Image (cartoon, helix red, strand yellow):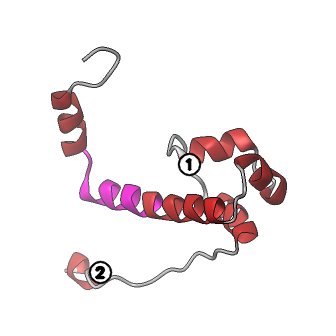
Amino acid sequence: MKNGVKWNDLKQSINSISDTEKTEIEATAKIMASIIKRRKELKISQRDLEKLSGIKQSAIARIEKQNNSPSIETLIKLMEPLGLTLTVTATDNTHSKLM
């Protein structure tokens, strides 16, 4: 593959990620998908969200592309102008990890 990642290299890198890291990546992806979806529903550009949130447009773009892992503070700053909140819920598998 030119200018790309070879399938075997990608497969190996995915397999090297721990289950905890995979869970964290999936959770972040879900949050960002919700933010992007809501921003687009409201027809708010990244530039507009910059004005509303105080987070620079370039940072918003990096976060939306998942090139950057945002802090909770940053997520809240992005979510508030979009009318979104962050909710924490318990999972069923917590007890089994403690055993």
Instruction: State the residue at coordinates (50%, 80%).
Output: 88
> Is 19 colored magenta in this rendering?
yes
20 or 78, which lies in front? Answer: 78
x then y, percent, for residue 27: 42, 64
Q: From the image, tell me which residue sits under label 2.
A: 94
Magenta segment main secondary structure: helix
x then y, percent, for residue 65: 52, 43
Where does the N terminus fall, quadrant-wise?
top left
Instruction: State the residue at coordinates (24%, 37%).
Output: 13
Residue 43 falls in which quadrant of the image?
bottom right
Residue 92 falls in which quadrant of the image?
bottom left
Q: Nearer the viewer, mark 1 or mark 2?
A: 1
Q: Which residues are magenta?
A: 17-28
Q: Secondary structure at mark 2?
A: helix
61 or 97, which lies in front? Answer: 61
Mark 1 nearby-residue class (10 Å; few <14, some 14–19, many ≥20): some
Residue 89 is tagged as none
Q: In the rendered structure, which amino acid carries the disc numbered 1? A: Glu
Q: From the image, tell me which residue sits under label 1.
A: 64
From the viewer's perspective, tell me whether residue 48 is left or right of residue 18: right
> In the figure, 56 relative to 20: above or below?
above
